[in-house]
């Protein structure tokens, strides 16, 4: 009975066809966009509530603890690296007193590492939400540089005192601080500040960017959260690569910091010219072996301890503030 009216009304079939086609297209678009949206949400950290003070507190605690652990474990390698870079000509490397200045250095590393990660974490979260998904690397680079700049106010005096102790100029950290201030003034504690920023701001930015980008790619490929050994391996790779790239900057920074009141170098450019003229360009790579080894192992320990500590602190949050496991986001 109803077939004839329908055959006489082709516009009804056309309407139904167009409606069904439009609905099917909508479903297809929604399905294709679902996964990228989850990826973008994961990268930007939108899967969890972000609180600046909470991120700062957890980063402060985790960064301080990780910094102390890695510094205490690898201090002898750092001492050898410093003595290699400070050596001019064919002098022998002294292998005694490799832990010289450790206690005083830890007193500076603790707040410096805490400030760095405490500033880095909330800054990273803020930038990731502000930048497009394809600029996440820029967010990590920027956050690393900002964290490095904030911590440099503590890290530079710590580095100056540490390297003077490692090269045998002073017997203890308190004596080093007192005599540096007496002979060179308070600014003596910040000698080489420009070269320190020249080395450490790129180092911090590049290392954390490489680490974060590899973690993002790995987690997306594995479709799960990373375990401790995986975080440690990625941290070692990021540290070793960054350490090798920034070795010339580290040599310059070391020479400027240990020169004391002699003022052998008049600045960064003069330091480079003098080293190249008197020792050759290869001198800018002095200590690259111990540096890559030290930072590679250090990156493994630092990021491994950092991520584990962050996980422990996250578990102590109220349930409403806990992040969603990555496997549950897919």
Image (cartoon, rainbow, N blue to C red):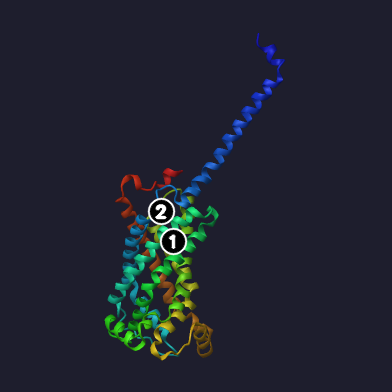
**Residue at 53% over, 86% down:** 273
**Residue at 65% over, 8% down:** 1
**Residue at 34% over, 67% down:** 67
Residue 189 falls in image quadrant: bottom left
**Residue at 39% over, 48% down:** 49
Q: Nearest the camera: 46 or 38?
A: 46
Q: Is residue 141 above or below residue 192?
A: above
Q: Is residue 267 left or right of residue 232?
A: right
Label 2, secondary structure: give it: loop
Q: Is residue 151 above or below residue 228?
A: below
Q: Is residue 162 above or below residue 151?
A: below
Q: Using the image, tell me which numbered label, if any, was put on residue 234.
A: 1
Q: Nearest the camera: 266 or 23?
A: 266
Task: Give residue 113's position: percent from left, percent from top.
Answer: 36, 67
Label 1, secondary structure: give it: helix
Q: Is residue 285 left or right of residue 121?
A: right
Q: Using the image, tell me which numbered label, if any, was put on residue 226.
A: 2
Distance from disc 1 to disc 2, alpha carbons, whole Å, reads 10 Å
Q: Is residue 222 above or below residue 61?
A: above
**Label whose residue precedes the other's in the sequence (1 or 2):** 2
The reply to whether callout 1 and callout 2 are in contact (CB within 8 Å) is yes
């Amino acid at each position: 009975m109803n077939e004839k009216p329908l055959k006489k009304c082709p516009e009804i079939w056309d309407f139904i066809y167009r409606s069904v086609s439009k609905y099917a297209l909508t479903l297809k678009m929604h399905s294709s966009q679902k996964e990228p949206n989850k990826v973008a949400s994961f990268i930007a950290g939108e899967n969890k509530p972000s609180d600046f003070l909470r991120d700062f507190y957890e980063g402060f605690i985790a960064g301080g603890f990780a910094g102390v652990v890695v510094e205490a474990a690898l201090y002898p390698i750092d001492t050898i690296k410093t003595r290699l870079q400070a050596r001019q000509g064919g002098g022998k490397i002294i292998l005694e007193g490799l832990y010289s200045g450790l206690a005083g250095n830890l007193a500076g590393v603790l707040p410096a590492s805490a400030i760095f990660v405490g500033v880095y974490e909330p800054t990273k979260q803020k930038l990731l939400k502000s930048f497009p998904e394809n600029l996440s690397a820029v967010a990590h680079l920027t956050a690393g540089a900002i964290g490095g700049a904030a911590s440099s106010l503590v890290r530079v005096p710590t580095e100056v005192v540490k390297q003077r102790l490692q090269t045998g100029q002073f017997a203890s950290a308190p004596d080093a601080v007192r005599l540096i201030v007496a002979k060179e003034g308070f600014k003596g504690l910040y000698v080489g500040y420009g070269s320190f920023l020249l080395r450490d701001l790129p180092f911090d930015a590049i290392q954390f960017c490489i680490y974060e980008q590899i973690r993002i790619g790995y987690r997306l490929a594995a479709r799960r959260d990373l375990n401790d050994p995986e975080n440690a391996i990625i941290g070692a790779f990021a540290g070793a690569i960054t350490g090798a790239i920034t070795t010339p900057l580290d040599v310059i920074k070391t020479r400027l910091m240990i020169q004391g009141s002699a003022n052998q170098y008049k600045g960064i450019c003069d330091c480079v010219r003098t080293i190249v003229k008197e020792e050759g360009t290869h001198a800018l790579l002095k200590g690259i072996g111990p540096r890559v080894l030290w930072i590679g192992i250090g990156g493994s320990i630092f990021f491994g301890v950092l991520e584990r500590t962050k996980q422990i602190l996250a578990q102590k949050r109220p349930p409403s503030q806990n992040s969603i496991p990555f496997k549950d986001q897919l």
